[in-house]
Image (cartoon, grey):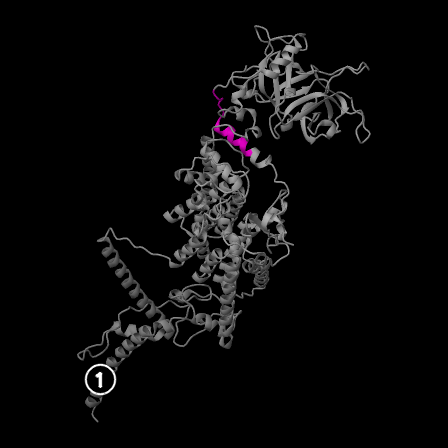
């Protein structure tokens, strides 16, 4: 064979090889693109999991780009791994040494196939083939996949731009989405709450009190209530539009309403709030990352609970309180997930603050929800401290913005409601006496009708009544009776004339101010004004005996001195009758002793003891009036502060004529005095928080430990002609299951916490975060609304438990959802039947809830005339005190 032939054959083989290699390379890129999704993941060894678990985790991963051992993406795999266990650290066949100079990345376009005219491949083609051979197949496929992803991303961005451009041509397009679950729950709740809303047409339970307050709003008459007024204001505003004039008198529970009373509109606001509570609970559960079906279960349980139904159908405040709390917490959860400064962040934060402030302005227990909000905010801020992407400036913005929103807005809501309250109630009423003299004088027709027209400055010869300024309403009083010679504990007394504090207006409340250096008591043409720090005597108007104190133990408070009116028994016990006038608010009222406004402390000159209301009640020998003592304790105490309420000048020296004037004198009513809004607000707050009268013991009262299992209910109303009645009871199955859910959650929380300390992660990180959110929101909400009642020293009822019960119900829904997650996670294969069995049990449980709801629904509506046997059959617990006709108890 000649050399020429041999060269020809060799040249043809080279040409064929050159043609074949680019075709193979192009086919390789094409196959890699088609199998991008299946070949993009890398599998590594792990020290904590076996290969099967790692492979299963990788297969189910949703990340488009795999992570290396140290968290780096596959796109940077040439320098990503520093872990000694990573496969990339081991030499792979055809791989490039990591410590050598990296080879340039191949281009996305494959090398074109050379034409037949080319005798040999180009330098570019040789370089590409050399680089392709040097890279491992897995890395080549990863790079190809990334290019394909970039192409897809570019295509998606182009489609989004086209969609935006299309939308910009339709500027008036409105997209409306309706949540059928939410609307269905609202309609179900609306139907149950508004069904026969005007039935019964009688006063039910606390409608007696709230109805009176609403009527006083209609007539602008001031009243005192220990709870804030927002709920009563909302109802009053609605019934005023319905034409109610406020002239109906609420006398007793069970009394029929007048025919002209708009009963439906009186009960409309609580019923509407009760209807909105179901979708509000549903949306709160969605914000807590529960599934839609679990959230719908929560809303349905609200509809099917008898206690929430009963409380929503009458003029009561709980439904408004619960709605404001639920909406506020739901908006707070959304606020914490929003971007700082965004429109959603501002709107959800403002809404949360307004509703939480409204909850505290309906009832003071609503501020417990605001406390829960502060806990959630502080916990979220603490978590943000771990975010390295946030600068110090951004962290300060997070903290300050939350402080401004969740302190400023609720405070503004609270103050604004009371501003409306004072502007509306400007007339005097039956509750005025609990307020100070200055407050009463600011009302039309109250104390102003007695005090206006009287002299302002207290002088020598003034006739005054001294009122205990803060705390209990009473006046400094004396009468002809004397202290007993000996008390039951064998202590002796001075046997002087008694001095007490009397809670009613009486002629024996009058005292005369006298200079020690003057004998007569007549006010001259130039009145001798009493100023701060001056010495006076107080002479009782009726008995003409001077106020006295000495080193004798008081009858009920032995550590303090006795206060009396001095009687000269000629036993060498001289009277100590001098008192110094200390004006405590002289910075605002000046040094002159003024009636009404000057707050004074009377200090006994001989012993430096202050005249004080002790708060203790005297026995029968003191006519059950309250004790007055002289206290040597230094410092200013509220019970040592007095003010002049009624005041007039003495015009005659004759004792009989002076006594006659005291008995017959009347003042001419004139305009009211002025007092600032802030002074009124502070005074009313102190009365509401610290001096509110406790409710006496009630036959339907209960203790907090009886609430979770519903040991006692409350009789709201009884029909006068049958055993039809309204009785507050919850759905037994819901209450007992929810109490069990509290224990289940606490047990799971302890179990997961201990396991995670051992680096055993039984649930996914996403589920763990959901578990923590439920604990922070629902479990802590239940604890914060329940445990404080164990420290409350007043009469409590079952309806005080309802705010805590709602959080317990929310936690029940989460526990049900979490147990379903655990069964789906761990019950595989034949174990999937356990999941189906669990869901079937939930359905059967829900059927039982519906059955109990319908069985006890006559106690919520009071419309069914029940027989004695029907009432007895519903008495499932001996502690349920159902009542029969004429209030005979069922035993």
Residue 770, magenta (yes or no): no
869 or 191, which lies in front?
A: 869
**Can you give x and y, in whole percent of width and height, for residue 252 in the image?**
55, 40
Would residue 750 appear left or right of 197 to someone viewing this image?
Answer: right
372 or 679, which lies in front?
A: 679
Report the residue at 65% width, 23% height from top: 476
Q: Is residue 816 above or below residue 52?
A: above
As helix, strand or loop, the secondary structure at mark 1 comes to helix
Would residue 567 appear left or right of 775 to someone viewing this image?
Answer: right
**Can you give x and y, in whole percent of width and height, for residue 685 in the image?**
54, 34
Would residue 477 appear left or right of 682 to someone viewing this image?
Answer: right
- Quadrant of the rendering where the N terminus is positioned: bottom left
**Can you give x and y, in whole percent of width and height, for residue 190 in the image?**
42, 53
State which region is magenta.
671-685
872 or 528, which lies in front?
A: 872
Residue 548 in view:
yes
Kindly report the secondary structure that dominates the magenta region of the rendered protein.
helix
Q: Is residue 239 above or below residue 119?
A: above
Q: Is residue 519 above or below residue 347?
A: above
């Amino acid at each position: 064979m000649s050399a020429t032939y041999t060269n020809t054959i060799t040249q043809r083989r080279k040409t064929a090889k050159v043609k074949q290699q680019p075709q193979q390379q192009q086919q390789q890129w094409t196959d890699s693109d088609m199998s991008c999704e299946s070949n993009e993941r890398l599998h590594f060894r792990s020290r904590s999991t076996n290969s099967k678990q790692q492979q299963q985790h990788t297969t189910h991963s949703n990340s488009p780009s795999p992570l290396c051992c140290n968290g780096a993406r596959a796109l940077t795999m040439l320098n990503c791994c520093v872990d000694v266990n990573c496969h990339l650290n081991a030499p792979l066949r055809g791989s490039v040494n990591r410590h050598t100079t990296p080879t340039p990345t191949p281009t996305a376009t494959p090398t074109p196939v050379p034409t037949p005219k080319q005798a040999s491949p180009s330098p570019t083609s040789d370089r590409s083939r050399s680089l392709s051979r040097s890279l491992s197949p897995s890395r080549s496929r990863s790079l190809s996949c990334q290019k394909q992803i970039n192409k897809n991303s570019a295509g998606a961005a182009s489609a989004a731009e086209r969609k935006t451009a299309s939308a910009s041509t339709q500027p008036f397009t409105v997209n409306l989405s309706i949540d059928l679950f939410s609307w269905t729950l609202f309609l179900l709740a609306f139907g149950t709450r508004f069904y026969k809303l005007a039935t019964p047409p009688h006063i039910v339970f606390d409608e007696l009190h709230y109805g009176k307050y609403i009527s006083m709003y209609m007539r602008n008459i001031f009243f005192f209530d220990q709870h804030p007024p927002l709920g009563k204001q909302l109802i009053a505003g609605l019934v005023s539009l319905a034409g109610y004039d406020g002239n109906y008198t609420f006398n007793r529970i069970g009394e029929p309403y007048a025919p002209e009373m708009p009963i439906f509109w009186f009960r409309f606001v609580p019923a509407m709030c009760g209807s909105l509570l179901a979708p509000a609970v549903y949306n709160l559960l969605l914000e807590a990352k529960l599934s839609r079906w679990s959230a719908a279960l929560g809303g349905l349980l609200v509809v099917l609970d008898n206690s929430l139904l009963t409380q929503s159908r009458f003029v009561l405040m709980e439904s408004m309180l619960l709605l404001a709390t639920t909406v506020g917490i739901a908006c707070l959860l959304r606020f914490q997930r929003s971007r700082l400064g965004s429109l959603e962040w501002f709107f959800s934060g403002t809404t949360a603050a307004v509703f939480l402030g409204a909850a505290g302005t309906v009832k003071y227990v609503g501020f417990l929800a605001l406390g829960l909000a502060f806990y959630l905010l502080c916990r979220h801020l603490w978590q943000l401290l771990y975010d390295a992407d946030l600068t110090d400036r951004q962290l300060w913005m997070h903290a300050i913005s939350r402080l401004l929103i969740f302190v400023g807005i609720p405070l503004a809501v609270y103050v604004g409601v009371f501003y409306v309250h004072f502007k509306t109630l400007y007339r005097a009423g039956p509750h005025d006496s609990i307020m100070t003299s200055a407050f009463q004088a600011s009302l039309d027709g109250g104390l102003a009708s007695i005090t206006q027209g009287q002299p302002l400055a207290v002088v020598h010869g003034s006739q005054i009544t001294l009122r205990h300024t803060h705390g209990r309403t009473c006046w400094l009083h004396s009468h002809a009776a004397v202290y007993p010679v000996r008390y039951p504990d064998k202590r002796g007394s001075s046997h002087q004339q008694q001095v007490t504090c009397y809670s009613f207006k009486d002629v024996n409340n009058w005292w005369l101010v006298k200079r020690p250096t003057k004998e007569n008591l007549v006010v001259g043409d130039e009145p001798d004004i009493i100023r701060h720090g001056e010495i006076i005597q107080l002479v009782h108007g009726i008995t003409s005996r001077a106020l006295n104190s000495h080193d004798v133990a008081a009858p009920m408070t032995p550590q303090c001195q006795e206060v009396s009116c001095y009687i000269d028994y000629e036993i060498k016990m001289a009277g100590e009758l001098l008192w110094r006038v200390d004006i405590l608010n002289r910075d605002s009222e000046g040094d002159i002793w003024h009636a009404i406004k000057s707050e004074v402390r009377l200090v006994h000159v001989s012993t430096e003891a202050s005249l004080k209301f002790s708060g203790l009640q005297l026995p029968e020998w003191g006519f059950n009036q309250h004790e007055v003592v002289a206290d040597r304790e230094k410092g200013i105490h509220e019970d040592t502060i007095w003010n002049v309420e009624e005041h007039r000048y003495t015009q005659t020296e004759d004792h009989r004529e002076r006594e006659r004037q005291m008995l017959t004198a009347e003042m001419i009513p004139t305009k009211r005095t002025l007092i600032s809004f802030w002074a009124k607000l502070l005074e009313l707050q102190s009365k509401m928080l610290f001096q509110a009268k406790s409710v006496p013991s009630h036959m339907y009262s209960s203790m907090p430990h009886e609430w979770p299992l519903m040991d006692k209910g409350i009789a709201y109303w009884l029909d006068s002609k049958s055993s039809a009645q309204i009785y507050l009871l919850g759905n037994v199955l819901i209450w007992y299951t929810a109490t069990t859910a509290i224990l289940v959650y606490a047990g799971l929380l302890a179990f997961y916490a201990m396991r995670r300390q051992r680096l055993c992660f039984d649930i996914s990180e996403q589920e763990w975060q959901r578990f923590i959110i439920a604990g922070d929101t629902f479990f802590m909400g239940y604890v914060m609304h329940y445990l404080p009642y164990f420290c409350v020293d007043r009469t409590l009822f079952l309806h005080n438990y309802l705010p805590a019960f709602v959080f317990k119900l929310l936690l029940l829904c989460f526990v049900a959802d979490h147990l379903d997650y655990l069964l789906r996670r761990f019950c595989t294969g034949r174990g999937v039947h356990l999941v189906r069995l669990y869901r079937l049990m939930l359905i059967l449980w829900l059927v039982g809830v519906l059955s109990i709801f319908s069985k006890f629904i006559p106690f919520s509506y009071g419309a069914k005339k029940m027989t004695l046997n029907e009432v007895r059959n519903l008495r499932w617990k001996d502690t349920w005190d159902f009542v029969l006709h004429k209030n005979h108890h069922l035993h």
